[in-house]
């Protein structure tokens, strides 16, 4: 009798367990939905907090003329400009770079253009490339690059000093780890010591801008590339991954760009998928393809072989250059002064 009673109870007991399992499974989509909503809200409010930093700094967004066309080849060519502080109403570009992101291969490449390159400027007298922005903004610089190098640029981003310093401080308020190559102090309003350092926004900018040594702009361009890689490594470190929305918001709040928030996030998400997140770099002019000359109206300029350098840029962006370090120019280049 007892055995009969226990047997009759088992189906009901099993049904109870089954119902509990069903209820638990039903909760899983709800939990996932809550997590998704929380994640979206976190990204949104973190991004907005970054934008607020720029607003508190009194930054005003500007829209520049930029008549580019997207060739829809899976790659995006972006003109990156570091704008110097205005002097007498004019603003030159302290940094001129061409960045390319390849969505198919998830590769980021960076071409640094020396600021003293002597170029033909559409509608103006030939002059140093760093003066083009003050004459006609990002659009004239886009035209100049296409005319002299045959490169079509699709987007632009103009970064000023305040933007750089603010983004650095958001990434790591204690500074960015970087190997300072030598003691530096001349004309940079700070004193930097050789060796591994944690540099805050102001000091890191000074390091990237220093050029009062034998290398001049050649050393400065190399350090700019070093700083960009250091910022990238720190921003994408495990400890900073949750800060990315705020970092992006801070950058977007300070940077004038033709790219939308959606485009930037798509590029960032694509880049993060990579296991190897290195940035390939090239400096123009390449070794033994230029000389310094004095021009009456422009002073000492870099006169380069445009055909050779243009071909190197195209080959680099297409992945046909393996050893870019061998092409790096230097202040002691044999072509100098010829």
Image (tube, helix red, strand yellow):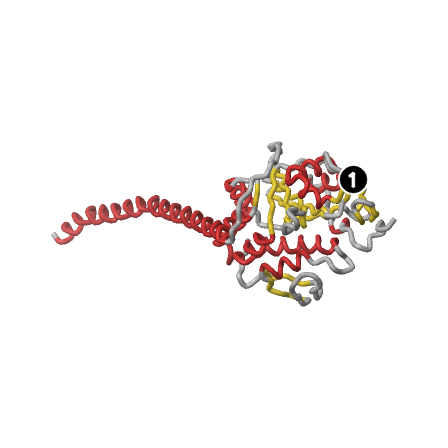
Residue 141 image point, x, y percent:
68, 39
State how many labels appear. Answer: 1
The residue carrying mark 1 is 306
Q: Looking at the picture, does residue 323 appear above or below residue 315?
A: below
Q: Residue furthest left?
A: 1
Instruction: Identify the element where label 1 is drawn.
Output: helix
Tell me: 29 left or right of 301. Answer: left
Q: Tell me which residue sits at (85%, 52%) in the image.
A: 334
Tell me: 74 left or right of 213. Answer: left
Residue 265 image point, x, y percent:
51, 43
Q: Residue furthest right?
A: 338
Q: Tell me which residue sits at (55%, 42%) in the image.
A: 62
Give the camera-side residue of 136 and 54. Answer: 136
The residue carrying pointer 1 sits among few (fewer than 14), some (14 to 19) or many (20 or more) residues within 10 Å by Cα, namely some
Residue 167 image point, x, y percent:
55, 54
Residue 311 is at least partly visible in this image: no
Residue 146 is at least partly visible in this image: yes
Residue 146 image point, x, y percent:
70, 36
Tell me: 327 left or right of 337. Answer: left
Residue 259 position by quadrant: top right
Give the camera-side residue of 20 and 214. Answer: 214
């Amino acid at each position: 009798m007892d055995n009969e009673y226990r047997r009759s109870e088992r189906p009901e007991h099993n049904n109870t367990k089954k119902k509990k399992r069903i209820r638990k499974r039903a909760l899983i989509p709800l939990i996932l939905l809550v997590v998704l909503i929380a994640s979206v809200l976190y990204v949104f409010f973190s991004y907005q907090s970054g934008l607020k930093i720029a607003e508190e700094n009194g930054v005003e967004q500007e829209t520049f003329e930029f008549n580019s066309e997207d060739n829809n080849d899976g790659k995006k060519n972006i003109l990156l400009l570091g704008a110097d502080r205005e002097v007498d109403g004019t603003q030159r570009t302290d940094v001129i770079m061409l960045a390319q992101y390849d969505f198919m291969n998830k590769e980021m490449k960076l071409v640094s253009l020396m600021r003293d390159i002597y170029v033909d400027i559409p509608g103006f007298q030939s002059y140093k490339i760093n003066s083009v922005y003050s004459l006609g903004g990002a659009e004239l610089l886009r035209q100049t690059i296409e005319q002299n190098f045959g490169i079509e640029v699709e987007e632009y981003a103009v970064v000023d000093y305040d933007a750089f310093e603010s983004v650095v401080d958001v990434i790591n308020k204690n500074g960015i780890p970087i190997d300072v190559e030598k003691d530096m102090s001349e004309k940079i309003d700070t004193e930097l010591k050789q060796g591994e350092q944690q540099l805050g926004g102001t000091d890191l900018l000074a390091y990237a801008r220093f050029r009062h040594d034998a290398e001049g702009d050649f050393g400065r361009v190399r350090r700019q590339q070093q700083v960009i890689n250091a910022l990238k490594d720190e921003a994408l470190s495990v400890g900073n991954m949750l800060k990315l929305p705020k970092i992006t918001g801070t950058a977007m709040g300070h940077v004038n760009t033709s790219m939308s928030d959606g485009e930037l996030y798509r590029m960032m998400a694509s880049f993060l998928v990579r296991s190897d997140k290195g940035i390939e770099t090239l400096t123009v002019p390449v070794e033994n393809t230029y000389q310094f000359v004095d021009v009456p109206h422009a002073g000492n300029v870099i006169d380069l072989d445009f055909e050779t350098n243009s071909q190197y840029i195209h080959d680099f962006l297409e992945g046909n250059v393996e050893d870019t370090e061998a092409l790096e120019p230097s202040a002691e280049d044999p072509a100098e002064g010829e």
